[in-house]
Amino acid sequence: MPPFADTLLRMNRRILVLEVVLVAACCAFLFFYGLGSFGLVGADEPRYAQIAREMLERRDWVTPVLYREPWLEKPILYYWRAMIAYSIFGVSDWAARLPSTTFAAFMVVFTYFWTWKFRRSARLDAALMLAASAIMVGFSRAASTDMQLAAPFTVAMLCWFGWYRTEHRAWLAFFYLFSALGMLAKGPVAPFLAGVIVAAFALVMRDTRLIRRTLWIPGILIFLAVAIPWYVAVQMANPQFMRIFIFEHNLARFGTNMFRHKQPFWYFLPVVLIAVMPWTVLVIAGVVEAVRNLRDRLRRVATDTDGLTVFLLLWAVIPVVFFSISQSKLPGYILPAIPPFLLLGALYMSRQVENSEGPPIWLIAAHASLVAVILAVLFIAPAQMMRAPAPVQATMLAALVGTVTFLTLAISILRHGYPMLRTATVVAVVLGVAFILRGMPRVIDATQSERMVAAAAKAVAPDVRTVATFKAKREVEYGVAFYRNQPVPVYERLEIPEGEHLVISRIGSEGELREILPGRVIKRVDEFPPQRLEFFLVGPK
C-alpha cells in the first residue's frame, strides 16, 4: 500500500459519512418536515389519495377505484405505495404524500453515490442541487404520479450510463428494473423516452452497436417480469382498460386537447427555468458548456472523454421537446428531465473548482439576485394568495430581506468562490422552505386546499350527510370528497340529491341555484371568502 494510503482511506470514509449525513439531513427537512402542514392541493392530490384509500378498503391490488367505479387513467405504482403507507400510518394527508417523498429522497441519495463513482468532485453539488431545487421540493411533497416516474427514470438513466462506462451487466439489469417501475408509474412513456435517449446518444457517439448491446435478453426479461403482470391482470379484470388508458389517456392526451391542458409550444422553456430555481444561472452555464461539447462531438473533436455531458444534455432536452409537441401540457410532465439539467449545473460548478476558476462577476450578480428575489417574494406571497394588497410592513420586510440576501450571497461567493455558492444557496432554500412551512400553511390551506372547506361544511351542517357542489371548481369536488370520504354530487352533471343536503357553490350563484331547485327550501348558511364559496342548505324534495 502506498504511503499515507490508509490515512486517505480513513479520510474518505469520514468525508463520505459526513456528506451522507448532510445529504440525508437536507432530504429530511426539504422533503419530510411538515409534510401534512397544509392539506392536499388541487384536484389530483385528493383524487389519487382517495383512490388508494378505496383500493385498500376493498383489498383490491389490481383495479384503481374511485367512488366504487374503476378509474383507469394511471397505472398502479402510486396507489400501491400509498396503500402501504396507509396500512402502516393510517389515512392522512402526509401518508398520501409519502410515496413521492420517499422516492425523491432515494433519487437524491442514489445520485450522490452514483456521482461519487463517476464524477467524484461533483457528488455533493449534484445531490444538494437536486434536493434543493424548486420543482423537486414541490413534487416531493405531492400525492401524485409524477415523482413515481421521475425517480425511477432518473435512476434507470444513471444506471444505463454506468453500464456504458463500466460494461458491468448489473448496471444494465438495474436499468431495466427501474424502467419497469417507470412503466408501472406512468405507462409506456418511460421505456419509450429511455429508448429514444439511448438511441440518440448512440448516434451522436457514432456507435450504433450500443443500441443492440442495450437490448440484453435477461434485462428485457426483468422488465417484462416486473412491468407486465399488473397490465395483464388489470386488463383481464377491466376489458375497457386498454381503450381508456392507452388510447384516451396516452395517445389522445398527446395528440388532442380533450383534457383542456393546451399551452403554446414554448411553454416548457419557462417551466424549466423556474423548475431548477434557485440554480437557474448555473444550469444555463452548464447547458451552454454541454452544447459546446455536443458540437465538438459532432465535429469529431471530443472534449468530454466519456460523453457524460452530451448524455445528460440529450436526456434533458429530448423529453422537453417530446412533451412540447404534445397538445396537452402540464409542468409535471417534464419532471424526469429536470435531474439532468441540475447535474449539468453541478458538473459545470465542479469543473470550475477543479480548474481553480472563481465565479465571474456576472454569474455572482445574477445568481445572488435570483435567490434574493425568491426570498423577497415569499414575504408578499400570502397577501397575493389571499387576493389582497401586500401590507406596507410586508413589502418593506421583503425589500430588506432581498437586499440583505443579495449582499450576503454576493460578498460570500466573491470571497470564497463556488463552494460558498452551493452552501449559501442551500441555506437560503432551507430558510425559504422553513418560512413556507411555518408562516404560510394556513394561507395555503385556505386558498389552495379543501381541508378547511370540508371542515367549514362539517361545522355549518354537522348532521347533514350529503354535500354537493354547484359552479365550484373540480378541486372542491375531489378535495371535499377525500376529507369526507364520500362522493360529492355535482349539479352540473345533473347529480342533484333528492334529500336534504349542503351545496357548496361559487359566490353569486344563489339565483341560479333557486332556478334549478324550484319549490325546495334553500337557506344560505355560511361562506368561505378565501375561495369565494358559499354554503346553502337545501331541503328535501
Image (cartoon, rainbow, N blue to C red):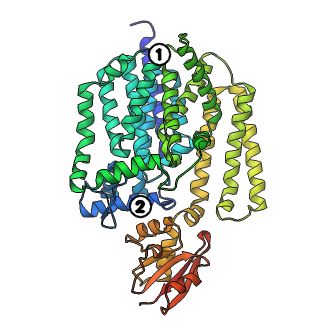
Q: Secondary structure at mark 1?
A: loop
Residue positioned 50% across, 27% down in the render? 314
Residue in the foreground of this view, choosing between 513 and 165: 513
- Write down the quadrant of residue 501 in the picture: bottom left
Quarter that holds the N terminus: top left
Where 536 sits versus 333, above or below? Answer: below
Q: Position of residue 363 (x, y in %)?
A: 70, 29
Q: Which residue lies under the disc numbered 2?
A: 47
The answer to whether residue 96 of the structure is visible from this angle is: yes
Q: Which residue lies under the disc numbered 1?
A: 306
Residue in the foreground of this view, choosing between 104 and 283: 283
Q: Position of residue 24 (x, y in %)?
A: 46, 39
**Kind of residue sitting beneath label 1:** Asp
Quarter that holds the C terminus: bottom left
- Write down the quadrant of residue 438 in the picture: bottom right
Residue positioned 74% across, 46% down in the render? 402
Lower sequence index among marks 2 and 1: 2
Q: Is residue 400 left or right of residue 95?
A: right
**Kind of residue sitting beneath label 2:** Arg
Q: Residues within 10 Å of mark 1 (few under 14, many from 20)?
A: few
Marks 2 & 1, CB-CB < 8 Å contact: no
Q: Residues within 10 Å of mark 2 (few under 14, many from 20)?
A: many
Q: Secondary structure at mark 2?
A: helix
Where 474 sits versus 110, above or below? Answer: below
Q: Is residue 448 left or right of residue 111?
A: right
What is the CA distance from the residue labelled 2 to the residue labelled 1? 44 Å
Q: Position of residue 124 (x, y in %)?
A: 52, 29
Q: How many numbered marks, from 0 up? A: 2
Residue positioned 60% across, 76% down in the render? 507
Residue positioned 27% across, 28% down in the render? 219
Q: Position of residue 38 (x, y in %)?
A: 52, 60
Q: Is residue 280 left or right of residue 298?
A: right
